[in-house]
Image (cartoon, grey):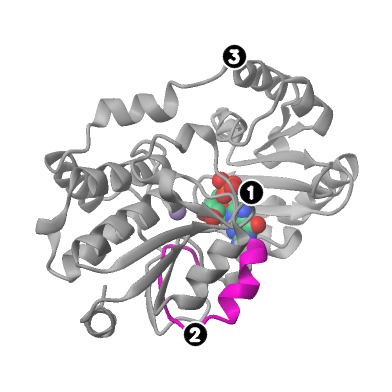
Amino acid sequence: MDTQTTAIVKELLSETKKIVIVGHKNPDADAIGSCLGLSEFLKTQGHVATVLMPNTFPDFLKWMPGSENILTYDQQPEQCEKFIDEAQVIFTLDFNALNRVGDLETPLKSAKAEFVMIDHHQQPDSYPVATYSDTSMSSTCEMVYHFIDALEQLDSLSETIATNLYTGIMTDTGSFRFSSTSATTHRVIADLIDHGAVNNVIHESIYDTNSPDRMTLLGVALKNLTILPEYKTAFISLSQKELDDNNFKKGDTEGFVNYALSIQGIIFAVIFIENKQENIVKMSLRSKGNFSVNEFARTYYNGGGHTNAAGGRSTKPLDDTITEFISILPHHKDALVNA
Ligand code: 5GP
Ligand code: MN
């Protein structure tokens, strides 16, 4: 965090404040871990901090310490609005634009509080008074660690903070394998372990809690895998019926797209997931090397994210979405083949 941003934040936090911390819609472990880690840290500094999320999050993240105190806007709208209205400072974490919080955007836009952003996505919006944005960072959780460091408060790291930050760094780096994992990331992880994060327990809590239904759904997803070697592309689709037939629960499809990306020679992978309730097809896009799925998702799917991991949506039916996707690929053949 640069010295100017640090100075603004120090000034904002120089007396006890009512603080709200918000993550993005469909929060992942990085959003939840960074919000909970920051919240616990701010409490050690004497502030009153509350974590709000736009909507509920998957069961496999509900063990994260403090997650039981998170308020979700889809379930507790009045309470969320009251906290936002009374907040003096609002931290927005792990997203770059207010439209990433769904319906929570409206109350946030009318908030009187000063905003601080901590985020590693590209093209951050300009609503905050202090923006700590760094697209080279592995995760927002790693940034929260550097934020605490910039405030010279690493002595306040507790087991709760360490566990939350470790979890988000681990998931956003694909267990420390993506190119965003730096030597500094590993130093941060080492310090988090020193402060009480128990690495094997965290890995098991996230990765070894699959339900039999999820495993069956993975089988369906892999049967639906299509490989287009001429475009170094592979994609998976799941219809609403296939989800329903396998008792789909939020979070069950997390990581499925990586199986498509793991095929030798594939550098672009997409999963299309039909959502009849929202009347959309939700997409997760992944790439290797310099083929930017952020650009691809922004151009065609009203989405965005990072160079190698992005999301978006289509309002066309599932079949049409896939047909259209295949028709777009020739326009990017050079970039895909030379990536
Ligand atoms: P995932 O595919 O795991 O949902 O998301 C991958 C990355 O893209 C994450 O960093 C996530 O925040 C971002 N992302 C996912 N969906 C959207 C979207 O609809 N819009 C934007 N701007 N980013 C998204
Ligand atoms: Mn993240």
Front in this rendered view, residue 174 or 128: 128
**Image point (21%, 64%), residue name:** 148
Residue 154 in view here: yes
Q: Which residue lies under the disc numbered 3?
A: 212
Q: Which residue lies under the disc numbered 1?
A: 336
Image height of 135 relative to 56, above or below: below
Q: Amino acid at mark 3?
A: Pro
Closer to the chain start, of discs 1 and 2, is: 2
Which portion, as a residue range, is magenta? 102-124
Disc 2 element: loop
Tell me the CA gap for discs 3 and 2.
47 Å
Image quadrant for the N terminus? bottom left
In magenta stretch: residue 121:
yes
> Ligand 1 sits in which quadrant?
bottom right
Residue extending farthest left: 155
Front in this rendered view, residue 175 or 329: 175
